[in-house]
Structures are given as structure tokens and as C-alpha cells.
Image: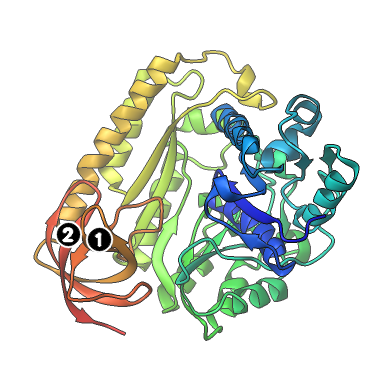
Amino acid sequence: MLKDKKFGMISLGCDKNRVDAEKLLGVVKAKGFTITEDISDAEILIVNTCAFLDIARQEAIDTILDCDSYRGGKLEKIVVSGCLPQKYVQEVFPSLEEGDVFIGCNDADKLIEGLELSYKEQRRVNFVGQGGKEEVERLLTTPQHFAYLKIAEGCNNKCTFCLIPKIRGKYKSVPIEKLVNEAKNLGDIQELILVAQDTTRYGEDIYGENKFVTLIQKLSQLENIAKIRLFYCYPDMITDELLDEIANNDKIIKYLDIPLQHSENRILKLMLRDGSKERYQELLNKMREKIPNIAIRSTFIAGFPSETEEEHRAMQAFLKENKLTNCGFFPYSREEETAAYHIKGQLSKAVKEKRVKALYATQREISKNFCVSFIGKEIEVLCDGIDFEKNQFVGRAYFQAPEVDGKVYFTAKQAMQGKKYKVYITEADEYDLYGECHEFTE
């Protein structure tokens, strides 16, 4: 009954979710089905959901409801996949009647079986938690020159604001040999981005000791991988061994994503973060000493329960003192089933949003000064393609990760996606650089 069906997909949420979505598309491709980017042309539509925050859950449900409107055309089935059914299947399967097949985060190998059952018996199917037994290859949704590699699932940290352990379960590393094989099969990749909820705890669960540096070394030996970028490195797990590897391994981009979440000790303690302002400061100083010009990205939560105005201003001062390269700021989201939900002193939405805006204003000034410092200099840029609105080529320097940081816009007689160029910087704003291509570098 599935013969000649055309599939479409909408994937919501983070880069880890994107990898799950790519596995679903890999199954579709392996079975010989057609995949369309035009969702109005799809007969089967997969909505890969996020459920990390209430706003993400609402976006997922709204997207599914919107997709249901295509049933008047070609659409026959909607597959609801990912975090929403993984965590809330008991709530959404009975009520979200727009979904025909429900599968969880690791059920890609059950996609076709679920659809066949739904078509055959003309009923809704719940296959959440029934997959994960077969290896699934991915179909990349990123440009061909960069890709994400999810090295672990779940999380063992007990952060009081976070639902991830309840959604994705305990930390589970993917064996080194499987990751190496997956990376080999990605083809020629200019930038491989390692992701997990906590990359720095890699291997402890299956090897009995930390193997993050070992994994990096193994991946660095692959000829098809030009560079490796590290995401989601928890500050308490950034060791001298890891910093030395970043400093001495030419394949590792001198960029580190470290989710600090706050700077003040009382709030960090309430968050159950294993860190302090003093330890964070020591770490940042050590990183810059061992790896000159390292780009540091972080995320912070504003308006955590009982956060005072003084603590908010102290976080602004921390940003001004440390001048991190890139930062993201988020208002605290009160989530049921988290410990922070019950902390006294919950702040209003208006206060939280005001503090987020203030933090972004502080960081914009830091970012602008950083960007302006490149005017009159030549930097290496990886071309990501063309921005047709700006009528310029667009790419990234080493201190810019895809989708979360700024970009470099440049003019050139010609430029190819996935190639590197020398760009002379002529202008800068708060996040982006602008320049002219002077030289092809590889």
C-alpha cells in the first residue's frame, strides 16, 4: 500500500533532533520512496517534534494541526515523531487525532512498519519505544560540506530546570566504532560537528572511563573529515587533556561551546550545576592561555526562580569581563516535572523577558567590538553558499558555527559551496562581517 508514496518532512528543535530526522529520511530513501521539499505535494508527512519547553510543545502541536489542513489535497498520513511522543505519548496519542503514526526519538526503523499497519488496518498506530534495534543510515539535510554527528543520547546531569533526562533517558554513548563508521559514510565533510546533550561525558557509561578525547582522535584520522567542531561541552568536564587535544590537533576548530547557564554561585547551586563563578573564571583563563584566540560560545538562563536584580547585573558584569565570542540567552521556562518548578520566587514573564533583552544588549556591544576588530584584516572563510537577498556569497570563519552564530558576507567573481576563501573584511556590524574575496585557499 506504500508503493510510490511521496514523503515530506518538517523537523523542529535542535541539531540533535535534526540527526534523528535525517535517520527517518534515510529509512525513506533506503526503501526507494520519493522525498519532496514541497509539503503540499507529500502524501505522507513526518513532523519531527521538540518537547524541551512548553513553547516547543505548543509549536509542535500547532504544526501538526496546520499540516492536517493538507488532507484536502494529496496528504494521506501524518507521522508524529521525536520528543513529543517520546515523553507525552500517553497524553497526545488519544487526543491528537490528526496524527496517524506515532514513533519516538529512536524508532526510525519502525517508520515503514507503522505506516503499513496504519494503511492496512486504517487506524492510528502507536509505535513509540518499539524501535532502535536496527542500524539506520542518514540522509543529510545540511549542505553537503558540513554535518552533525550525535555521539550520545540522553543525559545523566540533574539540572533542576531541564526535562531532557525525562524525555531522552539516561546518558547512552554510541560505541566508537559505530561513530567512526557513520562519519566515514558521510562523504567528504569540511566540518563535522559533534553533538550530544553533554559531549564531554562521552564513553563513561559503556567504557567505564571518559573516552571523549579518544573519540576525537579516532575521528581526526578519517581522511574524509577536514575539521571537527565541538558542541555542548560541560564546564566541569573540560579537562587539561581535552584542552591540550584542541590546542595540538590541527583538525579541531579552535572553538568551544560551553553551556554555563549562569555566573552567580547561589543560582548555580539552585540549578544543581557543578560549578561556580570562580571555577568558571579559572577555566576561561586556562582555555585562553592554552589556546590563544579560541572562540568561546555559551548559553545563559535569565530570570531563574528567585534571581535578584543584583544577580542579574552581576551576570552582565561577568559577560563584560570575559567577553565571550558568542552567547545565547533564554528566559527561564517553568516546566512541570522539574525540580525548579517548585522553587519559590518564580518571576513574571515581563521580568524574565526584560532581563533577556538586557543580556543581549550587553553581548551585542561585546560582539560588535569583536567583529569590528577584523576590519582591514584578511580571514579564512568557509563558503556556505549564496544569500540571494543580499546578492552576496555567505560563509563562516572558525569562530562562527552554523545556524547559531554570525556570518561572513562577501563578494567574489565566483565561489563554491564547501570551499575556503581568503576574505578581506571591509565592514562589520554586531554579529556579521562583510568583505571581498581575495584568494582561493584550497
Question: 242 and 172: which one is in front?
Answer: 172
Residue assigned mark 2: 434
Residue at the right extreme? 121
Evaluate whether residue 257 shows in this view: yes
Question: 241 and 3: which one is in front?
Answer: 3
Query: In the figure, 25 relative to 223: above or below?
Result: above
| Whole-percent x, y for residue 8 in the image | 61, 52
Q: Are marks 1 and 2 in contact (CB under 8 Å)?
A: yes
| Whole-percent x, y for residue 135 in the image | 77, 67
Amino acid on which the number 1 mark rests in the picture: Val
Q: Dot 1: few (<14), some (14–19), or many (≥20) neighbours within 10 Å?
A: many
Q: Quadrant of the C terminus?
A: bottom left
Q: Quadrant of residue 381?
A: bottom left
Residue in the picture at 68% in, 57% down: 24
> In the picture provided, is 27 more to the left or to the right than 151?
right
Measured Cα–Cα span from mark 1 to mark 2: 6 Å
Evaluate whether residue 228 shows in this view: no
Q: Dot 2: few (<14), some (14–19), or many (≥20) neighbours within 10 Å?
A: many
Amino acid on which the number 2 mark rests in the picture: Tyr
Picture disc at residue 408: 1
> In the picture provided, is 13 more to the left or to the right than 43?
left
| Whole-percent x, y for residue 39 in the image | 56, 47
Query: In the figure, 207 relative to 354: above or below?
Result: below
Q: Secondary structure at mark 2?
A: strand
Question: 68 and 130: which one is in front?
Answer: 68
